[in-house]
Image (cartoon, rainbow, N blue to C red):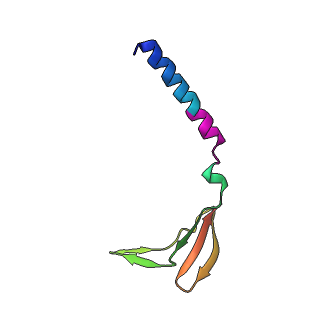
Amino acid sequence: MSRATVRVALCWAAVAAAVALTQAPSAAQMVMMAPIEAHYRVGGFDYLPPAGEGWRQVGSAPNEVHLVYA
């Protein structure tokens, strides 16, 4: 296969990938929810769920919270 043929094939592959990416919905536009325990310990580390800007608690149970980053 000549260099020109390889170059043309790579250009078409790049165009096809760009079209596929522009037509796919972005995951950032969807709600992503994760059930996370309210508190747990791993080794010597106490974990608490994030509470910074953008994190919202959307539900809770006795031993877990449901967070969404928006």
Instruction: Depth check: give the residue in front, 66 or 23.
Output: 23
- Magenta stretch: dominant SS? helix
Instruction: Decide which of 44, 34 is in the foreground and name it.
Output: 34
Position of 39 relative to 23 (above/below): below
In which quadrant of the rendered view does residue 40 lie? bottom left
State the quadrant of the C terminus: bottom right
For residue 14, what is the image quadrant? top right
Quadrant of image for the N terminus: top left
Residue 62 magenta: no
Point out residue 38 in the picture as x, y percentages from the top left corner: 52, 78
Q: Picture coordinates of residue 36 (x, y %)? A: 52, 73
Q: Residue at x 50, y 77 (%)?
A: 37
Count up the numbered dots.
0
* Highlighted magenta segment, given as a residue range: 17-25
Give the x, y percent position of residue 51: 57, 68
- Residue at position x 39%, y 77% in the image: 41
60 vs 6, nearest the viewer = 6
